Amino acid sequence: MVSWKGIYFILTLFCGSFFGSIFMLSPFLPLMFINPSWYRWINNPFPPGEDVLRYQEDGRVEWEILASEESAMGPDFIHARNIKPGWAMQAAAYIFIHRKWKDDKSHFEDMIDYFCDIREPLQLLIFPEGTDLTENSKARSNDFAEKNGLQKYEYVLHPRTTGFTFVVDQLREGKNLDAVHDITVAYPHNIPQSEKHLLQGDFPMEIHFHVHRYPIDTLPTSKEDLQLWCHKRWEEKEERLRSFYQGEKNFYFTGQSVVPPCKSELRVFVVKLLSILYWTLFSPAMCLLIYLYSLVRWYFIITIVIFVLQERIFGGLEIIELACYRFLHKQPYLNSKKNK
């Protein structure tokens, strides 16, 4: 049964993304032609710190971090996954893939080289499993394990290591990777499986995260050893999640704190309250501006036309951003260096 909480969440999420793309992101689009670093910083203002690659076993978390009533983390990441691009995702330079390595490799390489060249703080999140954990995906994973003489899993799926090893090697070669964060996600109560559950108001009451930091100099350098390293981490995830669900449904047994030291319950509550208030009022306010002012209406219409045409013609804002950097910044620099 559809609930008002579910309707509110879906409408706020999609309307906020739609109007936010038009009124918050589009005014800065010209910056991609002038200074890609500034443009990237405005779209993903990560605080100064180390450049990290984060991987986890559960793709549902991007929805559920937003919906969780207890979560202390925010979705501050660039994300590689096979989903239909949205304008805000394109502006954030999501790496969109097709799950066919021969098609994805060159795009992966181009985007990662771009991130390394502009030297903006990088936080790249990937899902090596490639899909969510369901009965069907678990059956396919166990079939794969049986054919290859691997352990069958109950709480995770066998990871696809090709993309993971490639990303680590590229970032390491570009000297743009300080550490790899292993993130394990667990749900002590309910586990929504799809947008349908969210529409019904079936939000996770809690989401628990276990984060383990691996400095880049502790990771193997060869591709084969890095693949084995990744598989080893998934074996640990399986045991960690088994202990979680068969035990007291928390990560206390790992000896690590539940809430990061930099956070507090009060801070999380205040930020969450302000965020809900802002995004609840933002879309109606934009609709009111469109209704009252003809100049805003024309801006709204023209921006939508530009967004639609650029996607049809070029394939997305991230493709245009990459092309701008190549032809307006990188190529002139290479030519001047060659002339010297």
Image (tube, helix red, strand yellow):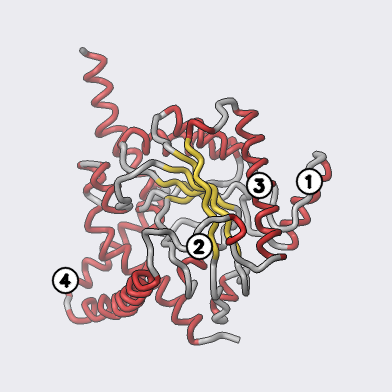
Query: Callout 4: helix, strand or loop?
Result: helix
Of mark 2 and mark 3, the one earlier in the sequence is 3
Which residue was labeled with disc 2? 258
Which of the 4 image quadrants contains residue 131? bottom right
Which callout, 1 or 4, points to the residue nearer the camera? 1
Give me the C-alpha separation between circle 2 and circle 3: 21 Å
- Number of labels in the image equals 4
Of mark 4 and mark 2, the one earlier in the sequence is 2
Residue 124 image offset from top left, x and y in percent: 45, 46
Which residue was labeled with disc 3? 234
Which residue was labeled with disc 1? 151
On screen, residue 231 versus residue 282, left or right, reads right
Q: Which mark is residue 193?
A: none
Give me the C-alpha separation between circle 4 and circle 3: 54 Å
Give me the C-alpha separation between circle 1 and circle 2: 29 Å
Please, what is the three-letter code of the amino acid marked with disc 3?
A: Trp
Residue drawn at point x = 39 percent, y = 48 percent: 93
Name of the residue lying farthest toward the top: 340
Please, what is the three-letter code of the amino acid marked with disc 1?
A: Gln
Which residue was labeled with disc 4? 295
Which callout, 4 or 3, points to the residue nearer the camera? 3
